[in-house]
Structures are given as C-alpha cells and as structure tokens.
Image (cartoon, grey):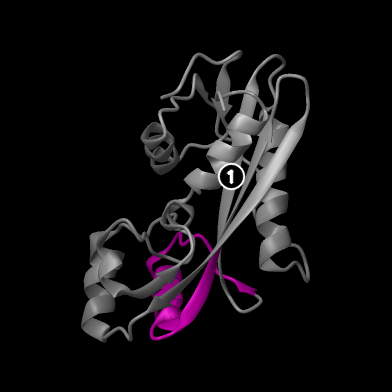
C-alpha cells in the first residue's frame, strides 16, 4: 500500500500511542524526538488556538534539515476551559468529576514540516459524551493509573472506554493522532505516495 519515501521522518513526540497509531497506516518514524515546551495556556487562549500553537511549537523545536518533522498536540476542553494533562490524582479526579455526564471536545492539531521547510497543518475536533460516573467508578479508574499524563485525565483507548456514551468525530484523534488528517498531510507533502 505504501511506497518508499524521499526523506526520513522525525516524530516530535514521546507518546507511544502516536507511534502505534502511525503504524496503523504503515508509517514508522525514523527518529523519535520529544520536545519539552511550556504547555501552559496563555491568558485568554481558547482550546483550538492552544492546540494549534503547541503543535507548531513542537514542530519548530524539532526541525531537522533534510527531514520531515511531524508534531501533534491534543487538548480536552469543556466549553472554553482547557483541561490539564493530569499529573496528580487530584487533577485527574477533578477532570473526571467535571466530565461526568457531560459533553466535551477533544482537539488534536497536527503539523508537518517538509525537508524544504514547507509546512502544513490540520485540526481534528471530536465531541465525546461521558456517562454519569459514580464515585466507585472514579475511584477504580484512578487506582488503575492510566490517567497519568493524559489530557482531561483519561485515555479513551483504556478502561475509560466504558465511560463513553457517544463519540462524534475521530477516534484516533481522541487517542492523540487523527490518522485521516495525518495521512493527508503526509501525502500532500510527498512523504506518502498519493
């Protein structure tokens, strides 16, 4: 299905989920180069521009001459509120309590920089509806630990799948890399054959 490509691909992410998702479309990055950037939302920054800015900054920080660079960032938002990537159990609990019984949006921005410096970007936006969670469900999920480092304090590809009443949009985008949009970028810049 996929043919040889003209240059190496750098994935500007440490996420094993993004590596696994790329493998689903036959893409194996030549280099993994996670970028340590400040992901704090700027004052008044809305979810969409926040995701787009972070993906751009990750791509810019990882640029390698003569290589493709792929970067992405996923943001979970309730209205205009950007939820954190949970680093503590208290953060994860606060996210789950907020998401319980409600609709939220997951935005994943993807940026591809070509070896010639040309760049393309796409944004995937999905709507996710959580069931109303009991205290026992929240405690059990927190005990599993898969919330650590996850935007919004949950991973749809794990035990939290049992909380999802409905999903409209890209499942892979909610996991962390929208494959349709990513494949379009890679084809458009000549990394993948049309």
Q: Residues within 10 Å of mark 1 (few under 14, many from 20)?
A: many
Residue 143 is covered by the magenta coloring: no
On screen, residue 189 versus residue 88, left or right, reads right
On screen, residue 194 versus residue 143, left or right, reads right
Which of these two is toward me, 141 or 155?
Answer: 155
Which of these two is toward me, 23 or 11?
Answer: 23
Work out whether 61 lies above or below 29: below
Q: How many marks?
A: 1
Which residue lies under the disc numbered 1? 72
Which of these two is toward me, 44 or 6?
Answer: 6
The magenta stretch spans which residues? 81-106
The quadrant the N terminus occupies is: top left
Q: Quarter-wise, where is residue 88 in the image?
A: bottom left
Q: Residue at the spot x=78%, y=71% of the render?
A: 44
Residue 97 is covered by the magenta coloring: yes
Q: Quarter-wise, where is residue 167 in the image?
A: bottom left
Q: Residue at the spot x=49%, y=63% of the render?
A: 169
């Amino acid at each position: 299905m996929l043919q040889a490509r003209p240059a190496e691909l750098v994935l500007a992410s440490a996420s094993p989920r993004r590596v696994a998702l790329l493998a689903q479309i036959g893409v194996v990055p030549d280099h993994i180069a996670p970028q340590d950037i400040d992901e704090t939302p700027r004052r008044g920054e809305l979810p969409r521009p926040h995701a787009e800015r972070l993906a751009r900054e990750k791509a810019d920080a990882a640029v390698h001459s003569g290589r493709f660079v792929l970067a992405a960032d996923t943001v979970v938002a309730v209205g205009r509120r950007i939820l954190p990537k949970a680093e503590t159990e208290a953060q994860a609990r606060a996210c789950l309590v907020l998401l319980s019984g409600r609709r939220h949006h997951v935005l994943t921005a993807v940026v591809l920089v070509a070896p010639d410096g040309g760049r393309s970007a796409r944004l995937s936006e999905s709507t996710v509806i959580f069931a109303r969670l009991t205290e026992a469900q929240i405690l059990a999920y927190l005990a599993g630990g898969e919330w650590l480092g996850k935007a919004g304090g949950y991973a749809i590809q794990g035990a939290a799948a049992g909380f999802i009443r409905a999903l409209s949009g890209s499942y892979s985008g909610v996991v962390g890399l929208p494959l349709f949009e990513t494949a379009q970028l890679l084809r458009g810049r000549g990394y993948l054959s049309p």
